[in-house]
Image (cartoon, grey):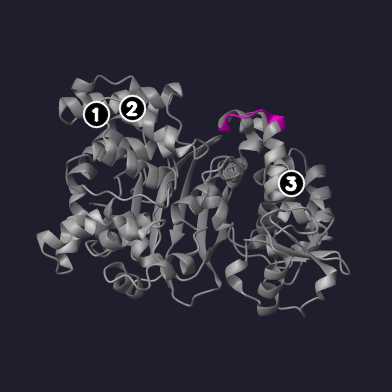
Amino acid sequence: MTTTDGDLRLDPESCYRAVKSRDRRFDGVFWTAVRTTGIYCRPSCPARTPAYGNVTFHPSAAAAQAAGYRACKRCLPDATPGSPDWDVAATVAGRAMRLLADGVVDREGVEGLARRVGYTPRHLSRILLAELGAGPLGLARARRAQTARVLIETTDLAYADVAFAAGFASVRQFNDTVREVYAASPTQLRGRRDRRGGDGTVTMRLAVRTPFAGRALLDFLAYHLVPGVEVAGDGWYARTLDLPHGPGVVRLDLADERDPGRTAFVAATLTLHDLRDTTAAVERARRLLDADCDPVAVDDHFAGDPVVGPLVRACPGLRVPGQVDGDETALRTVVGQQVSVAGARTVLGRLVAEHGRPVDTDVPGLTHLFPDAATLAAVDPATLPMPRARGRALVGLATALAAGDVALDRGAERGDVRRRLLALPGIGPWTADYVAMRALAHPDVFLPTDVGVRNALRGLGHDDVSVTRLVAGADDWRPWRSYALLHLWNTLMPPTAPPDRTEAT
């Protein structure tokens, strides 16, 4: 299983078969470098298949770049969705990749990244080099180059703005990297311009694998939206973002893409207080979309299941909604314990109005950032619009999050996060597991005590005895139980309300 480049995960013959078949399912899983041309491509590149003896295979675009290859201008290999391996993996490399995508190296350096995953910088570099073919600086550089290319080609931002929005420390570094990675200057890359709404506003296309159940994802987000922080309408969803350098807003246009095995794009409009937050905003939008999921692999797993199989066929490509802020997700989950979704929205709206930070936006209904953990940690539980015990649980969780005793930045080890959550007063298994699914992107979570699960199964025609048996046998749905759970919940989800009604819910 060892390639000529020393990677232990990639079998060159299997990779070459995927390249010969131009199988899009492998886009983002590995990259093909061609010695005779000096370029690297995605497996589905439409160019003539190179000879086997002329290619090497790399586990990341950064590894191909570090080996001296330039990105193919035809298939744009750096524009593919991220590898589902790293989105799902709970390994050190998987956790580090999720933090790298959020721009942690740009903001905190390699030392900050290593501190978050609990390793020394030297040891973390060794792990990433062994598993991904590049160290943290090389991986961060590849991410900056990809963000810069998208901004160059799809906006009319000035090049200096593009440089800092992509995370480069200087315009010179930006120019040198673009020329090295793409064998073209920024001016040459800018072959077309899309639209830019004004200072700090850019429109980008976020790559997702198909099938993609965009409407179902929209229905879930709209059903759970928090007044002041989120709004939704027919075909779109928008929310405020609390980013490292200031507030922002993201609007996503969501539609179904049923054709399997290709890359589709979700239009995202970002309005940012500081363009340096572009990378972080894009990554958080991708997390919300579960954009790096491999829907074909997930759906195939349920093909013969008598319960989930028909649901998958009715709604292929269903995603597990992620999050833009792990702390927010956990705090919202505690508020929603043992109350209806409508009741939770009402309470959360009051919390936002009283403790959230007001922001000015161009989107009607978006008025506040969700209260941060430090703010809620200082609140007297007796003043909160909820039962006293739940108020104490909320403040206790906020205190732990603000102090760093619980980290929900997707860089922490999932089992450790669960243990720390369960140690807090008022936090039970349902809450800890729901947080793992949404905040930590855990693909294999099931909630056996969830009322919605049982109601969904009854709605599918199962009696109480059958429901109990199916819940007890949920291990049959491993390792994708989170997706089975969402398919069951999806049967209960009302369609997105029209724009004039959604903001009032």
Q: Which residue is mark 1?
A: 426
**Of the residues under marks 3 and 1, which one precedes in the sequence?**
3
**What residue is at 50 percent from the left and 51 percent from the top?**
88
Specify whether 44 is left or right of 299: right
Kind of residue at badge 2 = Leu
Badge 2 density bin: few <14, some 14–19, many ≥20, Cα 10 Å: many
Q: Which residue is mark 3?
A: 134
**Of the residues under marks 1 and 2, which one precedes in the sequence?**
2
The Cα atoms of the two marked residues, 3 and 1, are separated by 43 Å
**Of the residues under marks 3 and 2, which one precedes in the sequence?**
3
Specify whether 400 is left or right of 115: left
**What residue is at 30 percent from the left and 49 percent from the top?**
225
Q: Residue 400, percent across and down?
A: 38, 24
Q: Is residue 117 above or below residue 288?
A: above
The Cα atoms of the two marked residues, 1 and 2, are separated by 9 Å
**What residue is at 39 percent from the left and 64 percent from the top?**
318
Nearest the camera: 41 or 183? 41
Nearest the camera: 387 or 498? 387
Q: Which residue is mark 2?
A: 397
Circle 2 SS class: helix
Q: In the displayed image of the protein, which residue is found farthest to the front?
A: 1
Q: Residue 81, percent across and down?
A: 58, 60
- For the record, the magenta segment spans 117-122
